[in-house]
Amino acid sequence: MIGERRARIPSMTQFYDLDAANAAVPELDRIMTALGDQRAELIRLRDEVLTRGGGSEGASTAVGGDLRLTRLRMQGLIDQMAAGVARIDAMGITLRDIENGLVDFPALVSGRQIWLCWRLGEKAVDWWHELDAGFSGRRPLAELA
């Protein structure tokens, strides 16, 4: 249709078939598990800093030193998370949600662009959705026509 805009995957994208997507699952499982753990630790450390007052003036030297160390640990976690996200990106996979361990693989089915969808804890890629649909639009692969 003239003037109709349809969601599209960027043109230089690697498209995954089901076998390639499933072959990536073990590495994704490791990366997403690590990202989830790192995220949880980062949140814990952030809450710890906020509880201590974030290094406000008047904090004792000992507390200030602890806060500096905590912030360094936080930066280390951020760097580790950035490396995990970069690895997923380098694989041509789209990270949707760290907390829920959700990623999408760009795929082409009968000339139609779709997302193959995988979530941490699933043993294989068994779901898909249209480009403009999110997690709530996931459907079993058996329904793919």
Image (cartoon, rainbow, N blue to C red):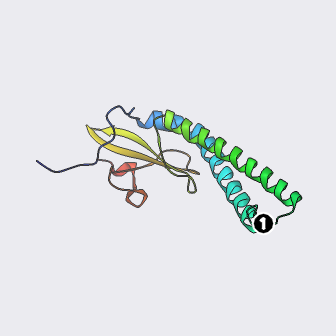
Residue pointed to by mark 1 = 52
Give coordinates of residue 13: x percent, y percent.
37, 34
Residue drawn at x 80%, y 50% as measured from the top left:
69
Q: Compare residues 134 and 79 and report the one nearer the observer.
A: 79
Q: Compare residues 81 and 118 and report the one nearer the observer.
A: 81
Give coordinates of residue 39: x percent, y percent.
65, 53
Which residue is farthest front? 57
Q: Could you tell whether 46 is left or right of 102 in the image?
A: right
Q: Could you tell whether 76 is left or right of 115 in the image?
A: right
Q: Report if residue 26 is visible in the image.
A: no
Residue count near mark 1 (Cα–Cα under 10 Å), binned few <14, some 14–19, many ≥20 = some
Residue 108 is drawn in which quadrant? top left
SS state under label 1: helix
Q: Is residue 93 above or below residue 41?
A: above
Give coordinates of residue 92: x percent, y percent.
45, 35
Q: Compare residues 119 and 141 and report the one nearer the observer.
A: 119
